[in-house]
Image: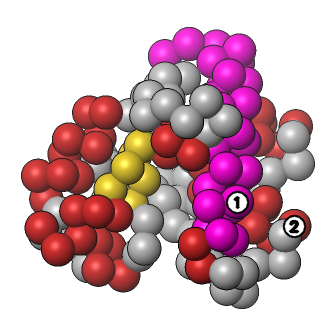
Amino acid sequence: MAQAVFAHHAAQAGYATQLIIESAGTHVGRSGDPPDARAKRAAAMRGYDMSRCRTRAVHNKDFERFDYVLAMEQRNLDVLSQDCPLEHGGKLQLLMTYGAAGEARSVPDPYYGGMPGFERVLDMVEDAAQGLLRHIRQRHFL
């Protein structure tokens, strides 16, 4: 969901061709699977297209390729921290660090609940996406 939300907001701001936005997981069963149908439905209701999103595992090259490696929850951040080369450790953060509250907190996993959980996650991700976009504009002078 975060990939689709951030890509949407980046495109709306005119940065679709300037930013590479991808999603990867620390615990991926099968690469190439589409997102959960409930996530796609919740995202679509807010205008986000997840049709091109597919699961994939984090690769070691991701740490050097991307300027930001953001985790949804602390457990994922811990796994990333173990795998990340020291020279790229500064790229690791929780996504919600960029939320309006500025708190490094975890996004709850909505997959074991109903649609309200997906709505809550979308609220959080939308908030963080706006904050991340502001940060990128300021830091990279876009």
**Can residue 64 be seen by looking at this rendering?**
yes
The quarter of the rendered structure image containing the C terminus is: bottom right
Q: Is residue 115 above or below residue 88?
A: above
In the depicted structure, whether residue 94 falls above or below residue 24: above
Instruction: Using a 10 Å C-alpha cutoff, classify the residue at mark 2 as few (fewer than 14 neighbours), some (14 to 19) or many (20 or more).
Output: few
Could you say which disc has been placed on residue 26 in the image? none
Q: Give the magenta range.
A: 112-138
Discs 2/1, front: 1
Relative horizontal placement of residue 55, taking residue 124 as reference (left or right) = left
Residue 42 location in percent, x, y?
Answer: 77, 33
Q: CA distance from mark 2 to mark 1?
A: 13 Å
Task: Classify residue 60 by image quadrant.
Answer: bottom left
Residue neighbourhood size for the residue with mark 1, other residues' Cα within 10 Å, grouped as few (<14), some (14–19), many (≥20): few
The one of 62 and 131 positioned closer to us in this rendering: 131
Read off the residue under disc 1.
134
Residue pictured at 29% horizontal, 62% vertical: 90
Q: Dot 2 corresponds to which residue?
A: 12
Question: Looking at the picture, how far across and down is residue 13, in whole percent?
Answer: 84, 70
Q: In the rendered structure, which amino acid carries the disc numbered 2?
A: Gln
Number of labelled discs?
A: 2
Query: Where 123 falls versus 44 (above or below)?
Result: above
Left or right for 100, reference 29: right
Q: Is residue 97 left or right of residue 78?
A: right
Tell whether position 123 is magenta.
yes
Residue 28 percent location from the top left of the image: 31, 49
Residue at image point 44% right, 28% down? 105
The correct choice, above or below, for 47 with respect to 141 in the image is: above
Residue 99 sits in quarter? top right
Q: Image point 39% across, 61% down: which residue? A: 69
